[in-house]
Amino acid sequence: MNTASRRALSVALFSASASLCQAAFCADTAPPNEIRAGLYALFYDASAQNISGPYAPAGLNLSVKNVQTLYLAYVRTLTDHFNLELALGYPPITKTYGRGPSMLGSVPYNDVELSSARWAAPTLLLNYKFLNENYALRPYLGAGINYVNFYDRESTAGGNAASGGPTQISLSRSLGPAVTAGLSYRLARNWGLYASYSYSRVRSDLTADTAGIIRTTRISFAPGALVVSAGFSF
Amino acid sequence: MHRFRGQLLAAFAGALLSACGADSTTSIVSSSTAHGTLAENPPFRIASLNASAFAANLAASTAGAQLLQVTGAPLCGIDFYYIKFWTVGAAGETTESSGALMVPTGAAPACSGPRPILLYAHGTQTDKTANIADITNPANSEGDLIAAMFAAQGYIVVAPNYAGYDISTLGYHPFLNAVQQSGEMIDILTAARTGLPNTFAVATSDNGQLFVTGFSEGGHVAMATQRALEAAGQRVTAATHISGPYALEALGDAEIFGNVSLGSTVFFPLFTTSYQHAYGNIYSTTSDVYSATYATGIDTLLPSATPIDTLFANGALPESALFDSTTPVVTIPGEPTLSAQLTAALAVPSNPNNPETPLFAAGFGSPYLVNNSFREAYALDAASDPDGTQAPTPSAGLAVAAPMQTFRLALYKNDLRNGSWAPTAPTLLCGGDKDPTVFFSVNAQTMAAFWSALSPNPITLLDVNATPSGSFAAIQVAFQESEAAQLASLESAAGGSLSPTAAQQQLVENYHGDVAPFCALAARSFFSQF
């Protein structure tokens, strides 16, 4: 999904939020706890410093491929307008690819899958919901913090060949701000539908250890996350 | 409903606790530091080049293009591995060292399957950070040489950086220490054989043949290694020793008596530091050997991360003045004739009929490196117990009795005539008779003469500067034509428009290094017979 289509979707959803709730259940107060599940589409806007370290030619860089994963969240209603959202994605496998020269000597590099890692990235958001409970469709904005822990870090065969041998990858943990904008649509007293788009900032220092030869780079992500989910309140 | 809630919470827990896989690992780091142990297995591959990419890399520089003309086009690709291994220093210190494992690759029959190992010892480096495995470093000309000459033609090349260099924390380099350096060569060979099956180049394996060669300092190291391997009953298929200082006592005597070699102000501190660590008796303080100008810090000066030209410019070393231009007057009570002879022998060389007189005389000056008192003590020892090459009736043997002067004794211990060993494997001694850095006559010819009296005698002596003849005639012609072309180039506008005298001087300065590729080519030709 490109930026224009994402924006169009957001505008359409916000416009729809002006409609008043038509159903009798709208006036009922929903229970304060809610579990949401849905689809998490991550759009990486990643940049990395050139890889540095012994025997690393100039101009070696990395790119990261977009992924989709399962979205899960726990939401606690605080007031009619505020709630607290702990958002989780089932930790996706994120793949890094070589970016730079097509070959390192006689070893392919550019666009070769070098490594993969899963990342657990819980995000805690304080959301403000516009309108009131008489409206089925309510826009909301949120802000909070995002924590990322990478694990199951694997260097692929292509990565090992490019790195010069079996390689141990480490990625430092990241803590950064996150913001979101979304729409909620109340289907019933206990059920709701949600769509949101979030941004967070992730910075991680990647260290590759190949037989004691250490190469490093700092990757900065500004992942955008489109979430479509359904929630159950209890 | 409670059951449904439970399932949702279980899904949350799964998401939170999903760290179920394992991170990938790097090479296995050995817990043993026993000598000959490969420290990290598999070793790190610095680069992988197929034959055409390697040829293109070489052809991109003038020196590389000239090298290709000597070596011929690469047949094989090469995987360049950087290996770390454990060895011991001159005083038995455990130390990690490093080096190169170059593995031929490619589909050609000469590039995969069982292949011979070539164990190579490099020439003296002043750069402490030098790494012969780093083919990406344009300054690594000797790495280029052995890669193009041997690995690209199907030899599995193994070459140490030597203790005291690169990652080694030894703190000094055991320069021309026959026991330590041969031990280190065997240690890297053991480590390389351990790592070879685990490299990316799975199609290439050791066929059991072992060729040993080395250049300059490495010529001595290679010969000492051949001696150690043969003494241990390990088969050496054949060996070639190139431009090495083998007859160290004879070489030391020649230098002390005024035949000062090009580069001696670099070699001398390496010698004394090495032997001080090995034997502990070369000096009480460095000023016992060195002039006040240079004595402080000379024992830790080399090898250095600082370029040698900077060390010269900063006054840490003289460029050529090994000895004081005010030479000693020797006075031995009751020995006026000997005193006069020694005084004359220690004077600044001035024989106008010797074309090497300007070279030798350049080894004298002020400020100078080595004290007259040290020089005189050495000379007295040499006079009372002369080397076989300097005796009144010349022979190729060592001094009859062990020297008394401690530095001369150290040279004696590391002189490869010591022990009366002669090779059993076919051996080629190669060099150039005009070599101003390591004298061909004092070393290669002395060893050949020494071995000629011993049997078996599988020795071939090649002077690339001699009148072309025999099976190496083409190489002799090529070397001599190359030198003539270089001289013409130096005098040309492109080469700097040097005067004939300056061009000739530059040619002399380049000579030692110029010999290396041609003798390496002779080595390859020699080895191809086996």
Image (cartoon, coloured by chain):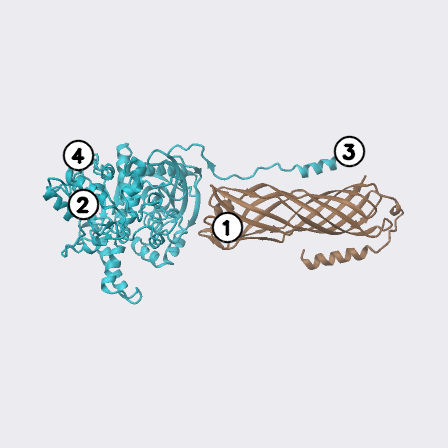
Chain colours: A brown, B cyan
In this rendering, position of residue B244 left or right of residue B96: left
Q: What's the distance in space between the residues labelled 1 and 4, CA to CA?
A: 58 Å
Q: Position of residue B35 (x, y in %)?
A: 37, 34
Which residue, given by chain and number where applicable, does mark 1 sit on?
A52
- Chain letter of mark 1 equals A
Q: What's the distance in space between the residues labelled 3 and 1, CA to CA?
A: 53 Å
- Chain letter of mark 3 equals B
Say which mark, if any, is on residue B401.
Answer: 4
Kindly identify the amino acid type of the residue bearing the numbered disc 3.
Answer: Arg
User: Is there CB contact under 8 Å for labels 3 and 2?
Assistant: no
Q: Tell me how many marks there are.
A: 4
Residue B41 vertical position relative to residue A203 in the rendered view, above or below: above
Kindly identify the amino acid type of the residue bearing the numbered disc 4.
Answer: Ala
Q: Nearer the viewer, residue B282 or B9?
A: B282
Which residue, given by chain and number where applicable, does mark 2 sit on?
B445
The secondary element bearing badge 4 is classed as loop
